[in-house]
Image (tube, rainbow, N blue to C red):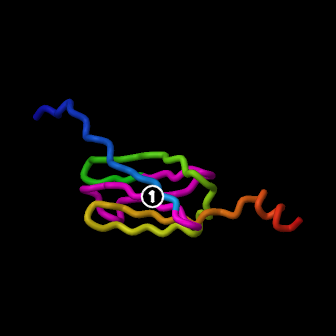
Amino acid sequence: MRKSLLKEPEPLIDIFQNGDNIMVVAELKGFRKENIKARVEKRRLVLSANAHGRSYHKILSLPKAVVPESMRMAYKNGVVEIILKKAIEAKAIKELAG
């Protein structure tokens, strides 16, 4: 059997800021929640998924620093939502301290 030369389209991804949170929404149809992994590296979110011989890997630049331990992930109907709490900037702490 011959493999198709057509490449699958890149999944749609949006990044939103809402108050103290950053939300990443990614369309990852065909994957199961247990096959989707996310981790934070500095101001980047690394998103990967593997299933049935398919794989996806994306590094996203986040608009602000985040607290990695605050990450919450939900997956429903082929859409993954990741919510991260924004980190308090060191500069803001210094200004508050005087």
Quadrant (top left, top right, bottom left, bottom right) of the N terminus: top left
Residue 60, percent from left and from top: 49, 47
Placement of 22 over or under 42, stated as above or below:
below
Residue 6, percent from left and from top: 21, 33
Q: What residue sits 52% from the left and 64% below the top?
A: 18
According to the picture, the residue beneath numbered tag 1 turns out to be 24
Residue 51, percent from left and from top: 29, 54
Q: Which residues are magenta?
A: 18-47
In depth, the one of 85 and 44 nearer the eye is 85
Q: Amino acid at mark 1?
A: Val
User: Which quadrant of the figure has residue 26?
Assistant: bottom left
In depth, the one of 21 and 47 nearer the eye is 21
Q: What residue sits 32% from the left and 55% below the top?
A: 27
Magenta span: predominant SS is strand
Horizontal side, residue 5 vs residue 55: left or right: left
Residue 5, percent from left and from top: 20, 30
Q: What residue sits 56% from the left and 67% below the top?
A: 19
Horizontal side, residue 46 vs residue 76: left or right: right
Horizontal side, residue 17 vs residue 8: left or right: right
